[in-house]
Image (cartoon, helix red, strand yellow):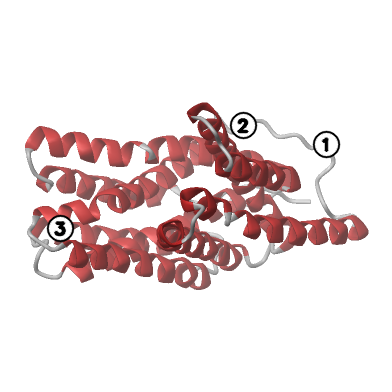
Amino acid sequence: MLLALSLLLASIALRAFAQNVPSLMLGTAGVGAGIAIAGTLIGGFIKAEFPSRLAVVMGVYATALAVGSVGAAALTGPLAGNHAGGWRFATGVWSLLGVGAFLIWSMVGVRAAKLNTSVDPPADSAPLPLNKGIAWAIAVFFGVNNLLFYAFLAWTVSIYRELGYSDVKAGLILATFAVASLLGNPVFGTLSRSRDRRGWLAVASVLCCAGLVGLAMAPQYAPYLWVSLIAFGQAGGFTLGMTLPLDNTDTVHETDVWNAFTLTFGYLIAATGPILVGILRDRTGSFRVPILSLVVVGVFMLLLTVALRPRMPART
């Protein structure tokens, strides 16, 4: 984790002081790699430190992700416009949070070393779960859930601009999406107490589908309600989806491997969301067909919850 944070800090600094496009792209790639490594390892840490409160702590983590994302997105623009350093200062200033995170994780590492509970022995290696049906089901669920998130994050403002809304109102609708996401993460993390999370996963998916259908059928009738339902349900699915690899593994190292598998294939699926919506919009001339396609994705996500039954913990 400390190596990942070091990579992240160095990459943020490289971007802030980049003098050409290649160095800017290299710094950006380093930022992505640092985030990806840390994101993979956090599940194993939660598994080791909070084995009886997986969903609750994952809800806290997911909420922190959402707060950080929304806060950075909201503040970077004003910082760039109001400081002589422009975008370099606005993007580089976030390294201060990275320094704080590095110091905190250093203390966590010292504590773990004293307790001798930091990691599993190297011999407890675990292969990628390529032959595990439940692992593929988790990865696909995580992927389609995040496909919806990135699609709406990218296109909500454009959807409502096309419907005649002003930039301000379209922006407020997107802000509603962000706020509802913040609420969904901790709520579902707190409510889901059983190792079998299919019931709450289904509830999250149903809420998301209800918002999608409302948006498809009557987008101007209650836009704030539709996007709130979509965001709240999607956020609940994200928190519980991140918990599923922890539910289906027995050791910290195995959890890290399953997380790596889930995040890799899940985000590859999720990345197609904004692109496909844009292609369908260009081909059809409106957002109606793309939104109907997202309804199908939501229904598929709901049906997929049936396959997410956790395996029984290993007997000792």
Mark 3: which amino acid?
Tyr
- Image marks 2 and 1: residues in contact by CB distance under 8 Å: no
Q: Residue at x 56, y 30 (%)?
A: 23
Query: Which of the 4 image quarters holds residue 170?
Result: bottom left
Q: Of helix, strand and loop, which one carries label 1?
A: loop
Number of the label disc, if any, that sits on residue 160:
3
Q: Does residue 132 show up?
A: no
View extreme (top): residue? 22
Tell me if 25 is positioned left or right of 40 in this view.
left
Which label's residue is closer to the chain start, 2 or 3? 2
Which label's residue is closer to the chain start, 1 or 3? 1
Label 3 crowd bin: few (<14), some (14–19), many (20+), radius 10 Å: many
Q: Position of residue 66 (x, y in %)?
A: 47, 61
Mark 1: which amino acid?
Pro
Distance from Cα at disc 1 to Cα at disc 3: 53 Å
Which residue is identified by label 1? Answer: 122
Label 2 crowd bin: few (<14), some (14–19), many (20+), radius 10 Å: some
| Number of numbered markers | 3
Q: Position of residue 73 (x, y in %)?
A: 42, 58
Tell me if 97 is positioned left or right of 121 in this view.
left
Query: Which of the 4 image quarters holds residue 121?
Result: top right
Mark 2: which amino acid?
Leu
Give the camera-side residue of 170 and 113: 170
View extreme (front): residue? 84
Q: Of helix, strand and loop, which one carries label 2?
A: loop
Q: Position of residue 160 (x, y in %)?
A: 15, 58
Label 1 crowd bin: few (<14), some (14–19), many (20+), radius 10 Å: few
Which residue is identified by label 2? Answer: 128
Give the camera-side residue of 108 and 102: 102
